[in-house]
């Protein structure tokens, strides 16, 4: 199986075939996402919140992203992988920005990068695309600007805001972005943007009119002991409970000397194992 390309994604939009995207941050999450036939994996800087334990995406570094993208690429070698450009790594000189993009592509083995922002980043987007790297835009609620926005609020609620979002989306398309993530945008505005653009929109909390959907792995699977219900998420499993119960049972078994049992121990006739971990 060959990974999807940005050409396939545009075609999927034209054919009305929804693009499926989920985040992943390491080898097992990527491998399972690929086995589940997801179209695109996003190594999101939501890494900061759901994997590294920060309270926003702001502390995430390019090092973090390269390291985790590389692990994802090992787990999903047949899936199109988009890596987030973290906070403040695409706002300095173009050389510095391109250096960060290069690391995500060459060391991380991403196929594309994603960047938050509107008109102010369009020149940068165009330069990265010119260098041969597909760029996914990201507008609406842009979590890297949380300290400026002052909260995770729904975007596009009045005509001026809706007009601004449409203008940003069009400018990103013109700058050469292959798609745009719309985060926490009213359904009406996201649908209008999706109709206006020829490149696909990927929604998260942006309703039913988008060309694709993206959710965070830990949200889809409730794989987080802090999980809080969010209107835009649908949960499909309760991994947090499964994992906690599994570990509790293991701890109990060891305490009660039920593990290891006879079948788990070596004797003199045993030899080489097929694998040690995993
Ligand atoms: O970091 C992330 O997971 C994202 C998605 C929510 C789009 O940017
Ligand atoms: Na992100």
Image (cartoon, rainbow, N blue to C red):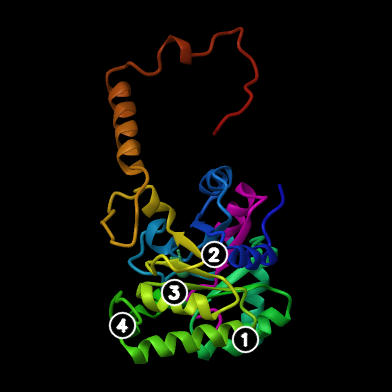
Secondary-structure class at tag 1: helix
Q: Tell us which disc is closer to us: 3 or 1.
A: 3
Label 4 residue SS: loop
Q: Tell me the distance, in whole angstroms, between the alpha carbons under discs 2 and 4.
A: 33 Å
Which disc number belongs to residue 65?
2
Query: In terms of secondary structure, where does tag 2 sit?
Result: helix
Q: Which residue is mark 1?
A: 174
- Magenta segment boundaries in residue numbering: 67-90
Which residue is at a point 58% across and 55% down the rendered structure image? Answer: 39
> Label 3, on which residue?
191
Mark 1 or 4, nearer chain start: 4
With 207 as the anchor, is 83 left or right in this view? Answer: right
State the separation of the CA atoms marked 3 and 2: 31 Å
State the residue at coordinates (53%, 59%).
18
**Residue highlighted by disc 4:** 157
Which marked residue is nearer to the observer: mark 3 or mark 4?
3
């Amino acid at each position: 199986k060959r990974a999807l390309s940005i050409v396939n994604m545009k075609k999927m939009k034209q054919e009305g075939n929804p693009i499926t995207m989920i985040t992943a941050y390491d080898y097992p999450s990527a491998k399972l996402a690929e086995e589940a036939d997801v179209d695109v994996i996003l190594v999101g800087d939501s890494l900061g919140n759901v994997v590294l334990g920060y309270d926003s995406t702001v502390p995430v570094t390019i090092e973090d992203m390269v390291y985790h993208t590389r692990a994802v690429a090992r787990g999903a070698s047949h899936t199109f992988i988009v890596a987030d450009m973290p906070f403040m790594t695409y706002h300095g000189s173009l050389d510095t920005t391109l250096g960060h993009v290069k690391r995500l592509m060459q060391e991380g083995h991403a196929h594309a990068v994603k960047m938050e922002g509107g008109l102010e980043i369009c020149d940068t987007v165009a330069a990265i695309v010119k260098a041969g790297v597909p760029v996914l835009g990201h507008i609406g609620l842009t979590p890297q600007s949380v300290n400026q926005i002052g909260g995770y609020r729904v975007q596009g609620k009045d005509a001026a805001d809706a007009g601004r979002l449409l203008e940003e989306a069009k400018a990103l398309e013109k700058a050469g972005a292959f798609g745009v993530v719309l985060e926490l945008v009213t359904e009406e505005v996201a649908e209008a943007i999706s109709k206006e653009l020829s490149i696909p929109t990927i929604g998260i909390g942006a309703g039913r009119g988008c060309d694709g959907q993206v959710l965070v792995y830990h949200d889809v699977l409730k794989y987080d002991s802090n999980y809080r219900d969010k209107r835009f998420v649908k949960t499909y499993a309760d991994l947090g409970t499964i994992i906690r119960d599994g570990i509790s049972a293991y701890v109990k078994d060891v305490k009660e000397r039920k593990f290891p049992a006879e079948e788990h121990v070596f004797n003199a006739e045993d030899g080489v194992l097929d694998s040690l971990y995993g």
